[in-house]
Amino acid sequence: MANMLDRLLGAVGWNPEEDDQGGVFDEITKSSEKKKTSGNVVAMPMSGGSTLNVLYPESFDEARNICQFLRLNQAIIVNLENMNRDNAQRIVDFISGSVYSLDGGIKKISAGIFVITPSTFIVEENIRGDDVKKELEDRGMSPWAN
């Protein structure tokens, strides 16, 4: 049993013959420091994909703030219904450029409401009215079933 334990410890780089004065731990620390600094590992930012922001911009100056949420991988609903048409169009144009450059998506929900999504966010737009009823019936979850 001890021989198997020695082989296991040897496989992970622990030499049981070394003293417990820190020699083994110093060696392990040095090897882990090398691993942290070497290689082509790129840290992936944690996405805020579960955040949905609803914004009501009042001027074109707020378009940049909207795009900041997109850069942070957060979805945004932009309500432009209360803006004048020219400023709303400028904001949509600005946001569209950012969406394109960040490989995101933009969907028009109504006359002045848009959903802006990062590339990691999917918006499905294929279910309406009776389609919802049929899909729920197919799943056996229909509240309309007799």
Image (cartoon, rainbow, N blue to C red):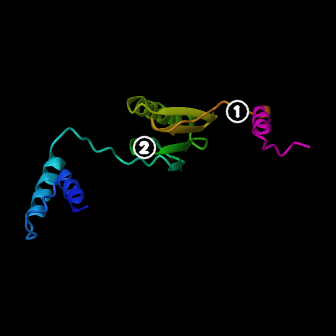
Q: Residue at x 28, y 45 (%)?
A: 43
Could you tell me which secondary element the residue under label 2 belongs to? loop
Q: Residue at x 76, y 32 (%)?
A: 131
- In magenta, the rendered stretch is 131-146
Near mark 2 (Cα within 10 A), the count class, few <14, some 14-19 or many ≥20, is many
Instruction: Give whichever of 32, 72 is nearer the camera.
Output: 32
Whether residue 8 is situated above or below residue 119 in the rendered picture: below
Which percent across, then down, holds residue 122? 53, 36
Q: Quadrant of the N terminus?
A: bottom left
Instruction: Give whichever of 76, 6 is nearer the camera.
Output: 6
Q: Which residue is mark 2?
A: 73
Q: Is residue 38 left or right of residue 122?
A: left
How many tags in the picture? 2
Q: Is residue 113 left or right of residue 30?
A: right
138 drawn magenta: yes
Whether residue 47 is situated above or below residue 122 in the rendered picture: below
Q: Which residue is mark 1?
A: 127
Instruction: Give whichever of 96, 117 is nearer the camera.
Output: 117
Q: Amino acid at mark 1?
A: Ile
Could you tell me which secondary element the residue under label 1 belongs to? loop
Q: Amino acid at mark 2?
A: Asn
Q: Closer to the N terminus: mark 2 or mark 1?
A: 2
